[in-house]
């Protein structure tokens, strides 16, 4: 089922029978204000994301919750998604108690962390192989080094060693990934709060979308997204969501960034300075979100899973498998790209 993203200058959403009725104003490609009206059947909706200046009625929110459709609130500018309203789920007290206990078990957390980091590096290596093939680049030594890093991650004796392995792989990944960006959009290093250039603006906003999508998947499975196995558990963030999204970064975030800039879907006019950083304009976010949704809903035959699927389905499956791993640790095997 599709996602709806509503990012307007202003607008309202109300419930009419089994439909959401949207009215509002957006900017077109020439920065002109255009009034729009849309009708969205609830049966055709899987999740709804709205910008913070959208007024949504109480009955509309209640209908979303009854249909188990999460509602995500997007900040008017910047990279952040402000939060979400999740449908009520059955109590999962026993599952959470087991999760709390295992989050203190270093053998369990190290096992899960090794799998996550190994899968992330595997996907980085595979993504570079694809880029090198399509663009006729020579990355032989890098591919070998990342292959060795996968083995190091799988055999790490502790989190500090694992962190070092991941850090070295990440530096090598970004160094080689950056050469496939257009020359007009250079990338020297990752900057987050705030992003210092258009490339980082795309990386940050896409990562934020993915983060909240993984958080929602964990909530729907009855897990506490805050109890990390690799990222340190601390107040103010969903550490387990950060953990489980790591293998998806080189599958979704960085490839989408190259695609958006190489194909001219995003250009200089789709970015603007704000509070010391560079952020996407509303039109830029609209274009990014459209391509993100296409990527997430595109069906493919997964060699890892052995069946046809989508990246969005894999995120939900990863959350469910991690829950199963609380009883059977071998049940969780992070997603690896073909």
Image (cartoon, rainbow, N blue to C red):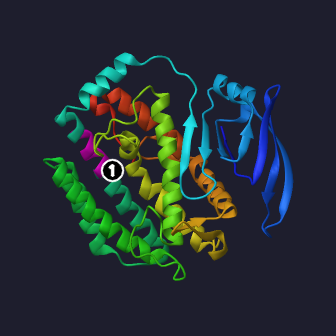
- Residue placed at 27% from the left, 74% from the top? 141
Extreme residue in the bottom direction = 183
The residue pinned by badge 1 equals 119
- Which SS class for mark 1? helix
Left or right position of 182 against 230: right
- Residue placed at 50% from the left, 72% from the top? 197
Residue 4 seen in render: yes
Left or right position of 282 against 238: right
- Residue placed at 83% from the left, 61% from the top? 33
Which percent across, then down, holds residue 154?
A: 21, 49
Left or right position of 116 against 200: left
- Residue placed at 78% from the left, 46% from the top? 11
- Magenta part of the protein: which range? 111-117
Q: Nearer the viewer, residue 254 or 295?
A: 254
Left or right position of 15 against 301: right
Residue 307 seen in render: no
Which percent across, then down, holds residue 38?
A: 83, 43
């Amino acid at each position: 089922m599709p996602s709806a993203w509503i990012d307007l200058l202003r607008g309202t959403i109300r419930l009419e029978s089994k439909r959401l009725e949207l009215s509002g104003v957006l900017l077109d490609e020439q920065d002109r204000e255009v009034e729009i009206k849309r009708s969205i059947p609830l049966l055709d909706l899987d999740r709804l994301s709205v910008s913070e200046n959208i007024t949504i009625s109480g009955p509309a929110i209640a209908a979303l919750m009854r249909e188990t459709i999460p509602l995500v609130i997007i900040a008017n500018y910047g990279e952040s998604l402000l939060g979400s309203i999740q449908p009520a789920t059955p109590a999962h007290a026993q599952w959470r108690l087991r999760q709390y206990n295992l989050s203190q078990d270093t053998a369990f957390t190290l096992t899960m962390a090794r799998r996550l980091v190994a899968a992330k590096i595997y996907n980085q290596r595979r993504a570079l192989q694809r880029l090198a093939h399509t663009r006729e680049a020579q990355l032989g030594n890098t591919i070998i080094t990342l292959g060795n890093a996968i083995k190091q991650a799988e055999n790490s004796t502790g989190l500090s060693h694992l962190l070092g392995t991941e850090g070295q792989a990440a530096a090598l990944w970004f160094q080689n990934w950056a050469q496939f960006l257009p020359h007009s959009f250079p990338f020297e290093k990752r900057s987050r709060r705030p992003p210092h250039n258009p490339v980082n603006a795309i990386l940050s906003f896409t990562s934020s979308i993915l983060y909240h999508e993984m958080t929602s998947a964990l909530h729907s499975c009855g897990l506490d997204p805050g109890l990390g196995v690799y990222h340190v558990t601390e107040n103010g963030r969903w550490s387990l969501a950060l953990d489980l999204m790591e293998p998806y970064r080189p599958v979704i975030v960085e490839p989408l960034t190259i695609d958006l800039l190489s194909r001219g879907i995003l250009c200089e006019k789709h970015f603007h300075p704000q509070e010391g950083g560079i952020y996407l304009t509303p039109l830029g976010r609209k274009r990014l979100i459209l391509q993100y949704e296409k990527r997430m809903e595109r069906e493919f035959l997964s060699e890892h899973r052995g069946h046809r699927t989508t990246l969005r389905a894999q995120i939900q499956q990863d959350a469910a498998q991690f829950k199963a791993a609380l009883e059977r640790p071998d049940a969780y095997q992070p997603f690896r790209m073909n």
